[in-house]
Image (spheres, rainbow, N blue to C red):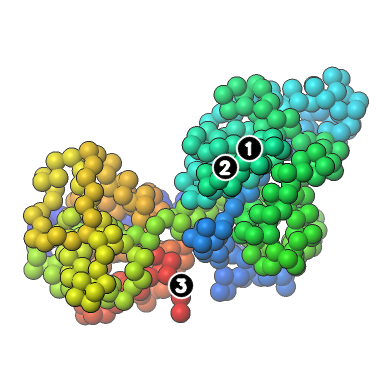
Amino acid sequence: MSSFGKHTLGRAGTLRRIISHVQHNSWWYERSTNPRRGTSAGRTWHAGRVTTDRYELVGIFGGAVDAGVASLFVGAGLSAAAGLPSWGDLLGPLAAEIGVAGEFADLPLLAEYYEQNGPGRRPALENHLRNVLSEYRTPAESHRLIAKLPIDEIWTTNFDSLLEAAAPDASVAVHDNDALDIGTGRRTIIKMHGSLSLDTPSVWTAPPVITRSDFEQYEETHPRMWALLRASYLTRTMLFLGFSFADPNIDVLLRLARRYGTTAADRHLTALRRPADPKDIQLHELRVRDLENSGVHVCEMSDFSELTPMLRAITTRTRPERLFVSGSGDTSQLKPWYDKLAVALTARPPSWQLASLGGPAGWGVTSRLAELLRASGRYTPDRFRIYFGKNPREHTPLMDAHFGTAIFTDLEREELVGSVLDNCRALLVICGGSGTTEEVRLALERGVSVIPLAASGATARAVWDSSATPPDLGGRPCDPQVWHNLADPDPDIAVMAAITAIDQAMCRPRT
């Protein structure tokens, strides 16, 4: 083995630590040990009831995003990661002020009683909410991930302004008349239950929907907002995140599902928190079955902390269909691989794009595939993107032909790689050195699926060796045989395994 190869393989320990960290912070890495549960083909069984698993949820919603018909609806569970209190913690202290002892299950009714009988009545109720919630001004990762999703309609019942802080380019609809301006193509955050001001958190931009009367009269007091929500439910695929049956705002989903379940068909999704207390399980399962019978796919989670990795997977799934090709080495090392890869990639969808920094492996695959497509009359320059940063000649070899689209930036190398990977679904590794190792690290940090053509050696082999088990690609576990074949000494078998893995990582529909 060359000194180049030995140097790269010495990085296997570092790669193993990176991959281990990513896996253990991913919801898909954990496998349930609950004997009441089992999984198969995207479905989970709970004592005779079938629910949707996380992989299927990501796939269905990702497809809706691709089609431009997706909306997101987020509840209080999303803001839990930013430290905000639950409904019970928010309203619980008010019970003592009106002489109510113990837990009070109907929290909007508790707010109603406080409005009628508490010291200060409605103004005191709103001041209490404002004083507690205005302390939280820093968005969590979950808010920032939502801001990256290519969707134009985000609904929320949350009073806080964390979504607006994470997506400052979005317009915000808080009043009923604001619904008239939605639908112009600009991303809009719709605060249907009121909102604190982003610029002045101590001020209500729109008063909160908080009491039982507020909920019951909503359709009369907010007719335009409700009509818009109804229209979205009937024409889009909506994903409801951050709810549990202990959340009074779940009533919004329940009303929509019961009224329009038959008309809206079987296309909506929700991720609900499963209760920890065994005595609450039976009622929870009956409620879930009610939703499923009304056309809502239900995915269950044990804690709202699972929302963030789920959103990471959705974010990756909704990126452009772009494959980053990484690697380096002598032409004699690389050419057999990129020739075979290019031939196989000619059969892939024309919507797929290749991205690279113009390095030996990236340019080799790009130029060979472009030649083949040009010969068959299918070449278009927008299928190939070659990025250049500051001082490109320091890192990029001389290119001997004109293919693709060159994109010049003033970014340093690491920043450039990160920005390119933020818009890719997968990274293919062929041979490679220390620069390739760095690209793998940046890809894993961003949830990009990494496919090492291990048979090519060097960094690709080190990455493959560092995975104790086949990783997830495109949100689903890679088939162990496919992963094994990436290191097969027969180049045809190894390349076919790489193409199969790329198909999965790019979320190509399975046939």
Q: Indicate the amino acid at tag 3.
A: Pro
State how many labels appear: 3
Residue located beneath label 1 in the image: 173
- Residue 473, by quadrant, is bottom left
Element at label 1: strand
Closer-to-camera residue (135/340): 340
Relative image position of residue 297 (x, y in whole percent): 66, 64
Q: Is residue 353 above or below residue 89?
A: below
- Which of the two labelled residues, at mark 3 and mark 1, occupies the earlier sequence position? 1
- Residue 75, by quadrant, is top right
Tell me, yes or no, if residue 495 can be seen here.
no
Q: CA distance from mark 3 to mark 1?
A: 36 Å
- Residue 81, by quadrant, is top right
Closer-to-camera residue (432/282): 432
Residue located beneath label 2 in the image: 188
Relative image position of residue 433 (x, y in whole percent): 17, 55
Q: Indicate the amino acid at tag 2.
A: Thr
Q: Is 7 on the left-hand or right-hand side of 106? A: left
Foreground disc of the pair 3, 2:
2
Q: CA distance from mark 3 to mark 2?
A: 30 Å
Q: Indicate the amino acid at tag 1.
A: Ala
Foreground disc of the pair 3, 1:
1
Residue located beneath label 3 in the image: 509
Q: Residue at x 14, y 67 (%)?
A: 334
Do callouts 3 and 1 mark residues in contact (Cβ within 8 Å)? no
